[in-house]
Amino acid sequence: MTLIVKTITRLTVGLILLYGIYIVLHGHISPGGGFAGGVIIALSFIHLMLAFGKETALKKLSEARASVMESLGAIMFLSIALLGLLGGYFFFNFFIHKGRPFTLFSAGIIPLCNIAICLKVGAGLFAIFVALVLFKGAKETE
Amino acid sequence: MSAYLLCFILFCIGLYCILRKRNIIKIVIGLGIVEYAVNLFLVLIGYRWRGRAPILAKGREILNMVDPLPQALVLTSIVIGLAITALIVAIAMRIYEKYGTFDITRIRRLKG
């Protein structure tokens, strides 16, 4: 890409990532949540890949690490749900202190679920994009 | 009522794009338009006049809120639509490798 695109990307890509993390962490008190924040985080990496090429983006977050993080999100969500069985039923809020409403540390297990969904969606979307890009490149060399 | 009609017009534009165009990429775009038209219709069903988003805020009582159920349904629908689009794009890329064209009338070997 041209110099203008590279400069603007270098300036804004960190802000996009930070905004995605903000959306995830405030998912239980404002609109947004795990899915929307995960998509924004994945878009920051895709932005990097579109501007600088696939080597730079894969150096930040490689294909194998994206796969590991995606699986980690699924396992984390499942284990949060299964830990609820300690209290008696599925998705039980196992925290003793519920927290004050409308503050950051509140709503029990919902922020943890948001983080798990964010890992799953962000890494999954990035992996889909990487798969489509690498798929095309691999066939051209044959 | 006019909003539903506009939704239907958007759906028809997408359907025209799927049925009439010959390029596979344009067909994928048409599928996306159809999907968004249906999502918009489902969200509009749950809308109430001057309704707020059904989210609790500090020190404010919600009297008139929109229906949250279609919104949750549409969120799931958007995720599935994303997966479908990725699948179709992957298939289109395979077709381009095999036949060297995106024109569906030139893909001869699929005909019986």
Image: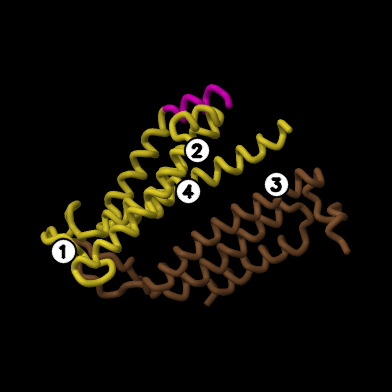
Chain colours: A yellow, B brown
Residue that carries the numbered disc 1 in the rendered image? B59
Write down the region rendered in magenta. Answer: A1-10
Residue sitting at x 66%, y 63%:
B14
Q: Looking at the picture, which amino acid does disc 3 mark?
A: Met
| Residue A119 in the image: above or below residue B32 | above
Q: Are marks 2 and 1 on the same chain?
A: no
Which secondary structure, mark 2? helix
> Furthest residue to the top?
A3
Separation of marks 4 and 2 at Cα, in angstroms: 10 Å
Separation of marks 4 and 3 at Cα, in angstroms: 20 Å
**Chain letter for mark 1:** B
Residue that carries the numbered disc 4 in the rendered image? A124
Is disc 4 surrounded by few (<14), some (14 to 19) or many (20+) residues within 10 Å?
Answer: many
Which secondary structure, mark 1? loop
Residue that carries the numbered disc 2 in the rendered image? A63
Q: Looking at the picture, which amino acid does disc 1 mark?
A: Gly
Residue sitting at x 47%, y 35%:
A62
> Which of the two marks, 4 or 1, is nearer to us in this view?
4
Separation of marks 3 and 1 at Cα, in angstroms: 53 Å
Which secondary structure, mark 4? helix
Is disc 2 surrounded by few (<14), some (14 to 19) or many (20+) residues within 10 Å?
Answer: some
> Which of the two marks, 3 or 1, is nearer to us in this view?
3
Residue sitting at x 54%, y 56%:
B82
Q: Residue B93, which numbered label?
A: 3
Is disc 3 surrounded by few (<14), some (14 to 19) or many (20+) residues within 10 Å?
Answer: some
Residue B49 sits in quarter: bottom left
Find out whether the residues at labels 4 and 3 contact each other: C-beta distance under 8 Å.
Answer: no
Residue A44 vs residue A75, the one in the foreground: A75
Residue sitting at x 28%, y 69%:
A90
Residue A53 vs residue A11, the one in the foreground: A53
User: Residue B31: within the magenta?
Assistant: no
